[in-house]
Image: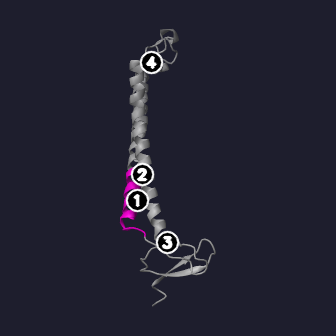
Amino acid sequence: MDEDSKLPIRCISCRQLNSIPSGFKSGRAQCQNCGEYLQNPTRKDEIEGYNKIKIGISAVIIFCIILLIPHVSNLAKLTLPENDSESDGSSDEIKIETCDPESSKYNPDDCLIDIESAANQRLIFASLGHVSLYSLLLFGLSQIFIGTSKVAKFHTSKF
């Protein structure tokens, strides 16, 4: 039973395996062979918890930046003066051959179907963008949750 209550810890310097009592609470443990201070094995879990928190916060920051980009872009378009010399007469409208009366493929019935299809494609891409953004936010929040859960298990790593 005495062996079960000891933590086996390998020294980083001399690679000697040391046995530290599991309830060891006084300061820092030293290697029995070379005297080097030993690393607490629970410290690894604590550091992993903090890293999860950092990843989660980074994901939330990236989410916010991505969310702001379209708004900043629209603000720039509204506030910056437009250069009329660069305009070539093209518009942002979709050119569909079945809707162009001068085209050989002109068909009013197909035109309506093509317009609905183009609108649906825009909605699909917009929805995919929103899902991606909110997934990033959820990932970030889950990483923060996991990290704080791991860190909450420890009072402090002494040793």
Of all residues, the one furthest to the bottom in this rendering is 1
Q: Position of residue 53 (x, y in %)?
A: 41, 55
Sequence-wise, the earlier of marks 4 and 2 is 2
State the CA–CA distance, disc 4 to disc 3.
70 Å
State the CA–CA distance, disc 3 to disc 1.
17 Å
Sequence-wise, the earlier of marks 2 and 1 is 2
Which class describes the residues within 10 Å of circle 3: few (<14), some (14-19), or many (20+)?
A: some
Question: What residue is disc 3 on?
Answer: 41
The kind of residue on which mark 4 rests is Cys
Q: Nearer the viewer, residue 81 or 1?
A: 1
Which class describes the residues within 10 Å of circle 4: few (<14), some (14-19), or many (20+)?
A: some
Q: Residue at left 49%, top 88%?
A: 3
State the CA–CA distance, disc 1 to disc 4.
56 Å
Q: Position of residue 83 (x, y in %)?
A: 48, 12
Q: SS for tag 2?
A: helix
Residue 64 got which mark?
none
Q: SS for tag 3?
A: helix
Q: Are marks 3 and 2 in contact (CB under 8 Å)?
A: no
21 lies above or below 45: below
Sequence-wise, the earlier of marks 4 and 3 is 3
In magenta segment, residue 141: yes
Question: What residue is disc 2 on?
Answer: 56
Query: Which stretch is magenta?
Result: 139-157
Q: Are marks 3 and 1 in contact (CB under 8 Å)?
A: no
Which class describes the residues within 10 Å of circle 2: few (<14), some (14-19), or many (20+)?
A: many
Q: Residue at left 36%, top 68%?
A: 155
State the CA–CA distance, disc 2 to disc 1.
8 Å
Q: Nearer the viewer, residue 145 or 92?
A: 145
Question: What residue is disc 4 on?
Answer: 99
